[in-house]
Amino acid sequence: MWLDLLTNPVVIAVVILLVLAMCRLNVVFSIIIAALTGGLWGGLKMYFANGGSRSLAAIGHESVALVQSTLGAFSKGLGNGAGIAFDYAMLGAFSIVISRSGLTELLAKSLMKMLNKDAGRKHITICKYALLFILTLIAMSSQNLIPVHIAFIPILIPSLLQIFNRFQLDRRAVACILTFGLITPYMFLPFGFGYIYLNKILIGNLADNGLAIAPEMVMKAMAIPAAGMLFGLLTAIFFTYRKPRLYDQSKIEAVSPTDVEIQPRKVIAGVAAILIGFAAQMFLKSLFVASLAAVLVFVIARIISLRDTQDVFVQGVYLMGGIGIVMIAAQGFAEVMKATGGVDELVDITARGLGNNRGVAVFMMLFIGLLITMGIGSSFSTVPLIAAIYVPLCMKMGISPLATLSIVGVAGALGDAGSPVSESVLGPTAGLNADGQHDHIYDSALPTFIHFNIPLLIFGWIAGMIL
């Protein structure tokens, strides 16, 4: 079993992806190399498993065919990510017009007034943790109450960088706050994106595989894992990243000026754009239509001209296009991994060789989920892949429906934090690295991996054992 796990093409590809990314190779380049390596290895593994011996000429032709099929699968996956990239480009335009409203500068100036030069250490500490608490609520609201996902990050965070520096706040703590707010609500609260993940995807796939679950069981099943996420967040804020950390103020001022003129007309237009964009997303379920509606509010209010929309879109693409390209490449990676059969093999490994040892079985189910989500970067895509095997396995071992719900839900969510290709990690980097002082891998991916995946694995295992 362990040999199969170590030689699995998904495991090999994910390890290569993480190693290359940690060596600071561009994430997109890392994804391409990892996908090609995993695809070629998967084909070679299947070749040797069939016990074939070929002539050199035949091996050459088969190798070329294998490379072509891997590239074909990768290209097919790229097409699947086009819609995601388009949404992000439009979200970038949305962010640009809101940034011109003065809303974020108004918030920043209000906070700066609270922190006058005579403010004592106790006052600064209170304001610091009050700000962190507000950021946590905003991030959580982006998934449930006002489901704008990561769109708020490049709008809000750059304007707060000066405040962070005044607090001498370690941005890694902020990255953990944002990632916590992007993940925990959808895996615990059945509203907004949580309704999609919990009620539609999780309960739906369990039902498709023979396990009927009542919607009211969801929060009870996911309460312990959510507590693990909270434990990781509190550890990051009050222990790991509590020490002061200073950043280059001149670089911050270049992206977060304090002398921006705030005009009431623009602020009102900004509020109106947010409300209309929110309504468009809620009723039409379309991010790009919501973004377009917000831009048109500024055009109608004559804050930007029709000609200015060209500049708005270009800046939006520059702001969020990088995330879109990563997500496109991640879709190509996921398609290659599926084509190798490595995902199915990982799930099968969980079902084989575990006997009736519930503790080992629960751990392996969660760990395999972590590997899959780390690779494809989407917990929403992981659940359908694993439910077909996990549900029958849990039923065979006598694991309760509540525990099964928790196991599959946590196995899907594991890896969303810490994956270099996850929106929940790319989003925080997009805001915190506005001045070029926040590294995607070492300041976003690694801190969120350590503080969320490890507690979620432990608390998820506990839930799978006691529920």
Image: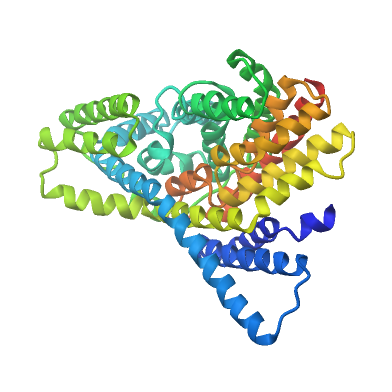
Q: Quadrant of residue 20?
A: bottom right
Q: Quadrant of residue 8?
A: bottom right
Q: Position of residue 45 (x, y in %)?
A: 72, 66
Front-most of 303 and 38?
38
User: Does any portion of residue 235 appear in the rendered image?
Assistant: no
**Quadrant of image for the C terminus:** top right
Q: Quadrant of residue 94?
A: top left
Q: Position of residue 168 (x, y in %)?
A: 53, 42
Horizontally, is 450 left or right of 285 in the view?
right
Q: Please report the residue visible at 32 percent of the width from the left and 55 percent of the height from the top.
A: 318
Front-most of 373 and 438?
373
Up/down of 395 relative to 377, above or below: above
Q: Please report the residue visible at 59 percent of the width from the left and 49 percent of the height from the top.
A: 419
Q: Position of residue 103 (x, y in %)?
A: 29, 32
Q: Position of residue 298 (x, y in %)?
A: 17, 36
Horizontally, is 74 left or right of 257 in the view?
right
Horizontally, is 176 left or right of 4 in the view?
left
Up/down of 16 relative to 396, above or below: below
User: Does any portion of residue 426 appear in the rendered image?
Assistant: yes
Horizontally, is 266 left or right of 419 in the view?
left
